[in-house]
Image: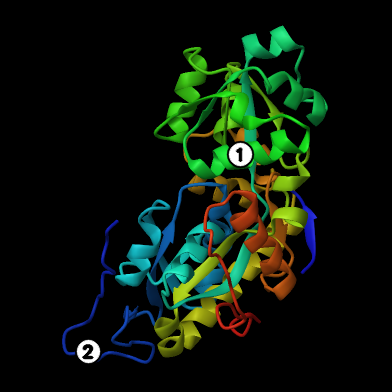
Amino acid sequence: MNHRMNRPYLVLAVTLLSGAACLTGCSGDGSTSVGSDGKTTVSVGVSGNVFDMSIRLAEENGYFDKQNIKIKYVTLTAATGTSALQSNSVQFLNSSPTSYLAGLSKGLPELSVATNGGGNPLGIAVSTEFAKKHGLTAETPAAQVAKALADSTAGASSANTKAEAGIFLKAHGVDPGKLKWVSLPSPAADKAALTKGEVDWFITSEPIPLQVQHEGDGIVVADPSKVPEWAYEQAGYGQVVVVKESYAKGNSATVKGFATAVQQATTYLDTHAADDKAVLAAARASLPGIPDDVLSESVKQVDWPETAEQDAAGWKKTVAFVKDGIGAVPDASVSSDNWTNKYLP
């Protein structure tokens, strides 16, 4: 795979014309529907973050349309995504590797059919007051940033992001266990805590850290360009397209069309500027209400793959990051039976 840093419960609405029979592509497991226009409608679970870009762009640029696929978006969380897929509420899930590996560890019959984003688009945002006190700017070297954070109050809204901050700190000799940590309920709460002065800094995925910087309430002092431990080269895949094994077997043409459209989108993202008209349109759909400059910078934080193909080396890095790096899935493992490139063009 070539990479270049460019940085709900809803049941599928099956529309059948009166007297129409189930067409090719239907199965007893998460059936899809073919409308009078000949297009297959599927539901896809998304998270409302920058990793949704490839799917949104595939729709924006007409790639799904060329595959005779219509998309219904279902916004899910890390806690609800896998269950929605297993209950057939969605046919495709844009999943983090952590959630996917957690499902595999429970024996769930899931299949990854494409990777559509590499690395972890994280940002550490410090308050303007903390930045001024410690002489920090967006250009401050990583080692100096970590040293400044050694005696601070930090905010995190998930165990995973807290662990990812720990990876960065430990890489520069700072013990994350000596910081004062504040557990927050959501990324939005991270932002609120910083602006209220309840924490000196927080870590979460983009675009919230960059939005805080845009609004003048903080400065992003660490991102994947400065923290190689978060980037694809060390952390592996950041997002994968997952289906149930039974759905893939019963709906191979639809899965192939979906995966093909996603790969066309990731290739486009890899080769076009973050302020490209189509890229921005997809970013606005993925992250509504976010300023364009924040959207463009957030897109740059992801390693968009030239090809959506997966390989054993990529999964080895990914499993190591999830299992050993952040300790999210202690028994994480993946085999060649759990992922495939056969649905890609």
Q: Identify whether 166 is placed above or below 306.
A: above
Q: Residue at x 61, y 39 (%)?
A: 295
Q: Amino acid at mark 2?
A: Ala
Q: Dot 2 lies on which element?
A: loop
Query: Disc 2 vs disc 1: Cβ atoms closer than 8 Å?
Result: no
Q: Identify whether 83 is placed above or below 345.
A: above
Q: Position of residue 321 (x, y in %)?
A: 65, 55
Q: Dot 1 lies on which element?
A: helix
Task: Identify the mark at residue 130; answer none if there is no mark.
Answer: none
Name the residue carrying label 2: 20
Give whichever of 332, 43 is nearer the camera. 332
Q: Quadrant of the N terminus?
A: bottom right
Give whichever of 323, 124 is nearer the camera. 323
Name the residue carrying label 1: 295
Q: Position of residue 137 (x, y in %)?
A: 76, 19
Q: Quadrant of the C terminus?
A: bottom right
Quadrant housing residue 238: bottom right
Q: Residue at x 32, y 78 (%)?
A: 30
